[in-house]
Amino acid sequence: MAKRVMVTTHINGEETTFLCEPRQSLLEVLREDLGLTGTKEGCSNGNCGACSVQIDGVLVDSCLVLAVETEGKKVTTIEGLASPAKLHPLQQKFLEHAALQCGICTPGFIVAAKALLEKKPRPSEHEVRYWLAGNLCRCTGYDKIVRAVLDAAQTMEVKA
Amino acid sequence: MAEATAEYRVIGTRPIRPDGADKVTGRAIYGADMRLTGMLYGKVLRSPHAHARIKSIDTSKAKALPGVRAVITARDFPPAVDRIANLGEMAVNVKYLSHNVLAYDKALYKGHAIAAVAATSPHIAEEALSLIEVEYDVLPPVLHVLEAMKEEAPLLHEDMTTTDLGQKTDRRSNVVTHFRFTQGDVAQGFRNAEVVIEREFNTGTVHQGYIEPHNATALWNEDGHLYIWTSTQGAFVVQRQVAEILGISVSQVSVTPCEIGGGFGGKISVYLEPVVAVLSRKAGRPVKIIMSRIEEFEATGPTPASHIKVKMGARKDGHIVAAEASLMYEAGAFPGSPVTAGGMCIFGPYAIPNMQVDGYDVVVNKPKTAAYRAPGATNAAFASETVIDELAEKLGLDPLEIRRINGAKEGDRQVHGPAFPRIGYIETVHAALEHEHYHTPLEGPNRGRGVASGFWFNVGFQSTVVINVNSDGTVSLVEGSTDIGGTRASIAMQAAETLGIPYEDVRPSVVGTDGVGYTDVTGGSRTTFATGYAAYEAARDVIRQMKERLAQRWNTEMEKEFEGQAEPEIARVTVDDVEYGDGLFRCAKARDKTMTFKDMAAQMARMGGPITGRATSQPRGVGGAFATHVVDVEVDPDTGKVTILRYTAVQDAGRAIHPSYVEGQIQGGVVQGIGWALNEEFCYRDDGSMTNASFLDYRMPTTLDLPMIDTVIVEVPNPGHPYGVRGVGEVPIVPPPAAVANAIYRATGKRMTELPMSPGQVLSRMLEK
């Protein structure tokens, strides 16, 4: 077995220290070692976006990042979005618009949409479609997902 | 968002799904999220050859690797029995099922499972795979249905003989079965035709493309009981298959269905469950396996490539008088393509007096095909709906008009025999004809508008629902139907409607084989229909029991009140005197005697104890589903790339219980159909290996490839369901490839006969003189 390395990072606002093998992806460590199974595995080669997380605010596929690369970084996963007893507006709008069917791609889409709205609070439909093209959904045909993101943007802007 | 109709309080509204918060926060437990104490990780060794005899397998080096706890091959399964087992949506030969899970003496496709390892980490398991030594005798593969049907073709199963028109022959061949459906006299029909079109079509192998890979976790306990956690469309069907393959009783197997990340027909057959079970028994610990995306493409169940011939003849007045089709479908490595369903659906939307369909189920060296959303019907409709479009053109008819003239109605006979009950096909054509989309001129060069219709028969099968009344007046609803797309909501809504209580007062849960009676797969568009039917009956059972108890109480009260009076009959309260509506029970014989559902629930303990309603369903009144689609495309004249400009899908839902999820099913089906039309196919090298086994190269539609998908829900209630439900999931995938092909024709003047209509394919057609 490869020698394990100690990594100290911030995950969803909390300092987290873990041991991992250098070959382990961030996705594997999140799911198998830290119990953060909200980040999903769909392809493990960066083509489906189900494992989307933010590292220092940047949207990445966690299957393409080695866990050791997160040393000293801030990682945000789907588990970090809702406040106690209150969903994030994106989560709420996904429910209201019925923007999920099986739900496996949903955490990835919501994290990706969050990253978009941080960069661009009022995106056009085309901008939403361009940004989310890295996330695959096989159930919805995307119509309701795009509407949910546009609606969430509006809600968040009103609140801000 | 939620608005009640005049007819119903709950049905037709759009409430938030009960499992919604769990799924948007990442807390919902899918199969891959399972974690048991002492759990090992498994990996599967797969054949690098598409067709090879397995001469020997040496697992000794793998077993010796530190961290490896068990290694198995097909020899660790009991000898497979050559027997047909009914698995709900399909019947399967247990021998073929077993040999597909682990190859016995031959590898029949690249990716065919050969051996499996359980180890303390997935990385060690992977290392161990490379230490397994397999000696193969490589054989020539056969990769296309027409090649496989040739007499000199290499045989996949040397002992297999063709069943021809129901008769077992002694002809050794890759053709498993040949069947024929006939109505009327097709030869005579063509003699009466004034315009005849005959065309041939080819479609490639495509995959369901669910985002969650197959997974399974098993614990084979020391007491002999086997526990399985998996993402499946049907826990009972997994239980049955595992028991058959392992030669044990179903009562020894408990299957818990985890949340499922898509299925579309691809998560009915077992692949990993028997493997993790036997690994667990050998290792004495729980074992989990998750497939990689490459394994998904190479070794699960795609839907067949096909070769289809269609001939149709019409009179000049637009009436189609004869139709003939020949469908050749690739079953993959083992028998059982959905060619029969394709044959049943190919002319489904039309009333044609003379029809004949021949179907051929053919084995090839590709993964064993599985169901995929209206299995077999999309291939078939691509062919028939393109030919009808050409007929309309030759007759100078609007393509929707020819469909209106020939559309099937109640009483019209289907090619395989049964007459249609009340159906809503014509209504979908009318809605498309009247839609603003169809009346908006499509301007600009290289653009075209196409239409196509589709039929899927839907199924009923078996479901069980239990409703337990809580003391606060809410109920918990227990069901066995995996929720893939919001069916917890659509089932709970039907229960709430029937119980006369708010939707929020019904708490549904999906449980495993130990928790509820037998329930077939979530498939065949059956869940909202058949499990919904069981929920309706279980709710009526609750109300009936409440009425009985109130009748008893009110009868006692009335006996006291009327004691000593001349006519005791006046005072007698029976269950027929108790009425229920809007959450309130009333006594027909004494208007002052009422009780709310909530009060009744609160007083259960003093009125006879707990109340549990239960029902099983096996509904016969299945209502077929029809759809008519309109699409606008633009074709890039330099590259052949097709862009979808606008899409409108009309569908008869019977009754839309939760309209948002009906729209969602339609939109999702349309987009899978667009992917099938334009991009998706398995590309093979001559040696039978796949060149595009990743989501990068197997190109499913993304957000950027699509416009919004407009939906029109037509409601022609199904008389076979208390709320008129038909089932909506499958038919929306059927029309898109033909609709897009017909639109490309309008844009380019070229008829498309191959799927997918990828840029290269479209361009080469455009460059043909």
Image (cartoon, rainbow, N blue to C red):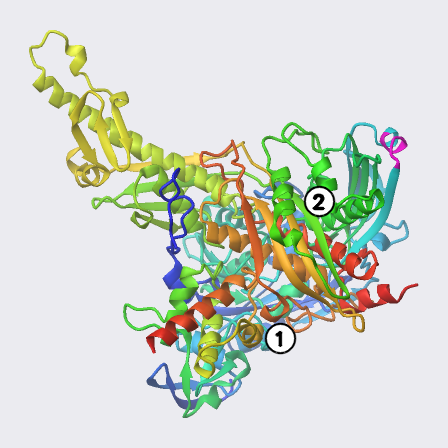
Evaluate if marks 2 and 1 touch, with contact meaning CB atoms under 8 Å apart: no
Find disc 1 in the rendering and name its residue: B61
The reply to the same-chain question for discs 2 and 1 is: yes
Q: Give the range drawn in magenta.
A: B189-194
Residue B144 point in image, percent of width and height: 81, 57
Considering every residue shown, the one lying at the far left of the view is B564
Q: Where is residue B37 in the image (x, y as percent from the top left)?
A: 39, 68
Q: In this view, does B718 lie above or below B155?
A: above
Residue B142 sits inside the magenta stretch: no
- Which secondary structure, mark 1? helix
Q: In this view, does B354 lie to the left or right of B414?
A: right
The dot on residue B400 is 2
- B297 or B515: nearer the viewer: B297
As shown in the figure, which amino acid type bears the numbered disc 1? Answer: Lys
Look at label 2 and name its amino acid: Leu
User: B708 or B162: which is nearer to us?
Assistant: B708
Q: Is B47 above or below relative to B733?
A: below
